[in-house]
Amino acid sequence: MKRVCLVTILLLVSCSVFGGYPFAFQNDAACAAGTDVDILLTVDQQDFYAQQIRCELTVQYVSLAVYDPNIKAAYHVYGEDGTLLLFEGERQNAIADEKGISRLIYDIDVSESLKQNDGKKLKIVFDLIDETNALWLSENPHINIQADAVYVEPNGLKEALRIINAAMKKQTFAFVANILVFVCFVIVGGYIIKNKKKIF
């Protein structure tokens, strides 16, 4: 019992120190970005395992020369083989702040796309559309956009692990404290039960 608890505590401490290192990743767009990039589209997470997902999209106008308040964000949904399943998802205003950054929250239901794709893995690609000229910026040869892709593959266990990892990253101290309290409760409970057996 003591060894199990000690291993659990050491594991939790290492996770809190390294910030969930086993699950860490670097965004595709951020890794691919170069000095010639005009716009970066990055998400807070790239892998999801449920039919309803929520992700935060950050639109960064690296070159303010291409910024236009009439530009809106949207997304396309593909099968893993590149088959287009949904041409255009929800449009949102991508109005930037003084630093050239716009942060948007997307709640996406991919259940219909999954049905079309026989439940197989999906790929969601964010894009920007210039409503004034009715043109997707990814198709504009004069603008270089680097965009993250979001992957969706329903899996209950992996989704539970994703939620736990996200909770640890956002509130590491509180998460570890709760686990430690639970471990202490198990130790005390086991000690009480053991002593009761000795008494009786």
Image (cartoon, grey):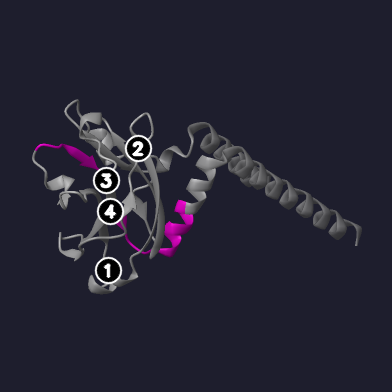
Q: Which residue is mark 3?
A: 70
Residues at circles 3 and 4 in contact by the CB criterion of under 8 Å: no
- Amino acid type shown at disc 1: Ser
Residue drawn 64% across the image and 47% down it: 179
Q: Which residue is mark 4?
A: 74
Q: Camera-side residue: 72 or 44?
A: 72
Determine which quarter of the picture holds residue 120: bottom left
Q: Is residue 144 magenta?
A: yes
Q: Secondary structure at mark 1?
A: helix
Left or right: where 200 falls relative to 191: right
- Amino acid type shown at disc 3: Asn
Tag on residue 96? 2
- Residue range corresponding to the magenta coloring: 142-162
Which residue is outermost to the right? 199
Structural distance between the alpha carbons of marks 2 and 4 = 15 Å
Q: Secondary structure at mark 4?
A: strand
Q: Which residue is mark 1?
A: 113
Residue 63 appears in the figure: no
Structural distance between the alpha carbons of marks 1 and 2 = 30 Å
